[in-house]
Image (cartoon, rainbow, N blue to C red):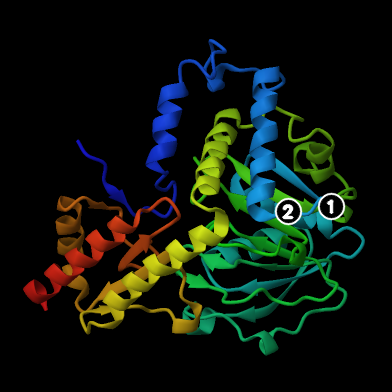
Amino acid sequence: MSRLYNFSAGPAILPEEVLVKARDEIMDWHGSGMSVMEMSHRGKEFMSIAKKVEDDLRQLMSIPVNYKVLFLQGGASSQFAMLPLNLAVKNKQADYINTGAWSKKAISEAKKYCDVNVVWSGEADNFTTTPEPDELKFNPDAAYVHYTPNETIGGVEFPYVPDTGDIPLVADMSSTILSRPIDVSKFGVIYAGAQKNIGPAGLTVVIIRDDLIGECQDKTPSMFMYSIHASNESMYNTPPTYGMYLAGLVFEWLLEKGGLSGMAAINERKAKKLYEAIDQSSFYNSPVEVKSRSWMNVPFTLSDAELDATFLKQAAEKGLSTLKGHRSVGGMRASIYNAMPERGIDALVEFMHEFEPQHA
């Protein structure tokens, strides 16, 4: 059976070249006689893998030397608690921008450990837009400002990086990391679950500025202390070794593709094709304000919701998989991460053009 075009929001599509290389190395990594899954995380073989994984990520993102890169577990959801536990210590106040489902979860968790000030919320507009820069008024005493650059469920994406001055900016980049170049120095902390643009589920990447590591709230579990993981180079406990290895193969693939600048050009082109197919039709509709549309997650609806099941069935028959929108919003959602080839977008657009005259 040929591979599908997998539009899943996560766990998501991986580059075919990465899967082929992992297949070829699964029994014997570089003549070691072992699979990476069998290696001690403290053995020389895996330590060499771990070093290259970090080095390649630093190269891809131009990560400054005064930032630590941590490879953890627990997903972005664990970071919702780790952030206030480690950053809101002397001053237990934090500002949050609420642009959708994942922002709301981060806010709910943070409220257990600090006073949360929601500086802006898109809930009244059903999370279909982002704030204008001049709408954001931050508390000068906030320990940090948290935002979600790209909301996976609602398909809402910030077209800019908020300017928080001297207040550390924290970003949940789970569904947008590595999709384009960013200036890491504008952030205090960047964190991301791997299962969208990095690798398989089970790995979480945290990029944190050195001066934000050290203190934590009383009774913070050791596993939730950034200082513990940083001082042990992500080896305080057994890390997700195979997830790190696969992430490393993705990083190599990205470097071979021209890095993040090259990827940005491809991603912008893919998104433009799909949004044009939606906008040029009265049959399809995008609920997201144009300025806030995501490159990575594209939700859309049909003019008649009763056709949704037929659309999904016929799309699946064409090899277009996992297009059903999140249960909380309905409709369709095409997640078009780095690994989605442009031919996959072309196939989806062609199907949309075929489906419309048959059902309009």
Is residue 27 rendered to the left or right of residue 145?
Answer: left
The residue shown at (64%, 64%) is 182
The amino acid type of the residue labelled 2 equals Ile
Q: Residues within 10 Å of mark 1 (few under 14, many from 20)?
A: few
**Front residue (pair 160, 106):** 160
Compared across the picture, whether 265 is left or right of 32 comes to left
Q: Residue 69, image x and y in percent?
A: 73, 45
Q: Quick check: 287 above or below 171? A: below
Residue of label 1 = 66
Q: Nearer the viewer, residue 113 or 329?
A: 329
Residue, x 89% and y 48% (percent of image)?
A: 214
Of 110 and 163, nearer the camera is 163
Q: CA distance from mark 2 to mark 1?
A: 8 Å
Residue hosting label 2: 63
Mark 2 burial class by Cα count in 10 Å: few <14, some 14-19, many 20+: many
Residue at 84 percent of width and 66 percent of height = 143
| Observer able to see residue 309 | yes
Q: Where's residue 154, x and y in %?
A: 45, 69
Q: Is residue 323 visible?
A: no
Q: Position of residue 38 (x, y in %)?
A: 56, 17
Query: In the image as oriented, which residue stretches furthest toward the left?
Result: 358
**Which residue is painted at 78% across and 61% down in the image?**
188
- Screen quadrant of the C terminus: bottom left
Q: Is residue 26 above or below residue 288?
A: above
Q: Is residue 45 above or below residue 214?
A: above
Residue 53 image label: none
- The amino acid sitting under disc 1 is Asn
Q: Residue furthest top?
A: 33
Instruction: State how many labels appear.
Output: 2
Q: Quadrant of the N terminus?
A: top left
